Image (cartoon, rainbow, N blue to C red):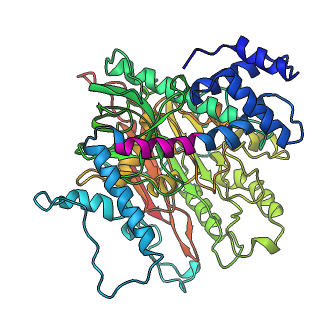
Amino acid sequence: MASVSTYDIKSELEMFDITCDNDMVFDKMLEQCLCNRLQGEDIVLEWVAFSTTKGGMKLNLDTLEQFEHEVLNKKNKFKLGLSKREDSHNRTRDINSLQDLIKAEEEEESLLDSYSTPAKGSQKRRLTTPEHPQSKRTAALIASPVLLLSPASFSPSSTPSQKYSQRGGRGDVVSTFGAVQGTPWMGRGGQQQGAQLELLEGSEDSLINNYKYMFQRLRDVRNVLTEKIELLGEELRTHFSIEEFSPLSLPAQDCVTVLGQVCCDSNGKLNAQSVLLEAGPEQGGQQVPVDLTELREYSLFPGQVVIMEGMNTTGRKLVASKLYEGVPLPFYSKPGQLMVMVACGPYTPSDGLTFDPLIDIINVIVRDRPDVCILLGPFVDSKHEQIEVFFFPYVFYTNTHTWPLLVGCRLVLVPSQRDVHHHFIYPQPPFTLHDLIKDDAERVTLVPDPCTLLIEGVTFGITSTDILFHMGAEEISCAAGSDRFSRILKHMLIQRSYYPLYPPVEDVNMDYEKFQSYGQMPVCPDVLIVPSELRYFIKDVLGCVCVNPGRLTKGQVGGTYGRLLIQKCSTSIDGKRLSPCVAGQVVKI
C-alpha cells in the first residue's frame, strides 16, 4: 500500500468542495487510513457516501467517530471474514489455525443440523485424532463454564423470618487478625484533641465538590484507557528490566514480549477461550486472541494491564508461556496507637425504615470510644423495598445532624451509589451538610468514593463500591488452592486502582475523566477497606491489611462491623516494613 499523507486527504476533499479548518480532523482521517489500509481517495469516497446518506453531515471529529463505527468497522469485519476463507485454502497451517478450523467446521455442522429433523440416536463425529485424545484439563477448560461465585463465598445465611430485634450472638467476634488476645478495644474518643485526619492528596487534588457528569465522549474514554496502559506498562518494563515491547500482531518466529489490556471477544463472561489482548493506540488498538494452555497459573479479568511472553508465529494468536504480574505502589511512611471502627450500610432492616441498627452501632461507638469511626453508605438504600413511598432525604439529613453529638469521635462519612438521595456517578462526590455547628463540623469528615485517607500517619484506602463482587463475577483463574478474595485484592493493588475492571458492570455509572483523576491509588494503602455482599474477612495482601467488614444489616437480620487497632511503627531491625495494623476483628452487631 502506497503511503498516505494529510496533504493527499485534503486534496481529495477539495475535489468535492469539502473544507475543514481543524487539522485534528485530517490527522484522524490519516489514522483511519493506516488502521484500515485505505488510500486517501478511498476514505474520501467512503466519507462522501456516508455524509450524503446522512443528509449532508458536516466533517468534524464527532462525525468521524460515527463514520468509523458505522462504516469502517463493518467493512473490516467483512474483509476479515473473506480473508479467513481464502487463507483456509491457501496458507500453511499451524496447530492453532487447525484448531480454529475444526471449531469453525463444528459450528457450521451444528448450524446445518438445526435446520434438519434430528435422527433418532444420531451421533456426532468428533474431529479429533483418536491416537491423541484431548486431555481432561483442556476439555474442562473448553466445556465447563467458569463458576461465578460459590455459595461458600457469601456470608452465612440466616432465617428470613428472624427479625432484627430478635437476633442472636450480639457482639460475637466472627473474624480476627493479628494478636487479639488481651487487646483492650478502647480508643481515645471524646477527648478534646482528637485524631488527625486528612485526605492524602490534599484539598486541591481531591474530589470535594459536585461535578457535571454524563458528558464524556468515547474519545476521552479511549485516552484514559490508553494512558493507563502506557503508565502501568512503563512501570512494569522498568521493574522487570524489559528492553522493549514487540508489536502485538506482528508475526515472529522467536519468543516475543508484548504489553496490552485483557478484554473479552464478546459481551459475555470472560473464560479461557475468549481472552483477547488489546494493544495501545500506537499499534492501532489491535486485538489478538491469547492461548493460555501453556500457563500453569493465571488470574485475569477484563481491563487488566499485563505483560505476556510467548509465540505469535502467524500474528493471529499469541500462545502465552509467561505472565508478568504487576507490582504495587510503595507505602506511605511516617511515625501512638489508635482504634478505628468501620461499618457499612444499609443501616435499616429490609422490612422497615427504622434506624435501629444505626442506633446500635452508635451505642457501640459510645461504649468503645474509637479514635475514628468510618461509616460507609448506603445510608438510604435505593434497593430498599419501601424507599419509593417515603421522603428519604429527610431521613438522612435529620439523622446525620445528631450523630456527631452522640459518638463524640472523629466521624468519616463515605457515600455509596446505592444512596438514593445522592449523585449516581463514580467517582462519587462527598455528601454536603450545611447546617452543622462549628464543633460538630470539626469532628465530621465528608469524603468521596473512592478516597485515600491519612489518619495519624496511616493511609486508609476506602471505597463503598462492591468491587469484590463485580470482579469476582468476571475474573478467570487457574491456580491450585488460591484464595479468590486475595487474588482480587492483589489485582487492585498491582493495577493501582480502586476499580480496575473494564468495562464496569451496569450498576456502576463511570465517568472516566474524573476516574483518571480521583479513582487511582496515590500510594499503596496501609489499610484497604472494601465492603461487600460477600463474606467478611480481614487479611494481609502484599503487606496491605484488607478489610471487608460486611454489612450492618443482611435483609431483616443483623450483620457485622469491623474494628482495627493501629500502631504506626518504624522499620524493624532487619529493615523490613512492619504492618501498622496490630489487630483486627469483625464483630456481629
The kind of secondary structure the magenta stretch mainly shows is helix
Residue drawn at x 77%, y 42% as measured from the top left: 213
State which quadrant residue 514 falls in.
top right
Horizontally, residue 575 falls left or right of residue 551, namely left
Q: Is residue 86 magenta?
A: yes
- How far from the left and from the top, in percent, is residue 417? 67, 54
Residue drawn at x 47%, y 71% as measured from the top left: 170
State which quadrant residue 298 falls in.
top left
Which residues make up the magenta segment?
Answer: 76-89
Note whether residue 149 is visible: no
Residue drawn at x 66%, y 42% as measured from the top left: 427
Give above or below for 23 relative to 394.
above
Of residues 460 and 479, the one drawn nearer to the viewer in this rendering: 479
Of residues 331 and 148, the one drawn nearer to the viewer in this rendering: 148
State which quadrant residue 53 falls in.
top right
Of residues 278 and 214, the one drawn nearer to the viewer in this rendering: 278
Of residues 132 and 228, the one drawn nearer to the viewer in this rendering: 132
- How far from the left and from the top, in percent, is residue 450? 61, 42
- How far from the left and from the top, in percent, is residue 17? 88, 21
Give above or below for 585 relative to 60.
below
Horizontally, residue 166 falls left or right of residue 43, namely left
Give above or below for 458 relative to 535.
above
Note whether residue 264 is visible: yes
Q: Is residue 269 magenta?
A: no
- How far from the left and from the top, in percent, is residue 374? 59, 48
Q: Quadrant of the N terminus?
A: top right
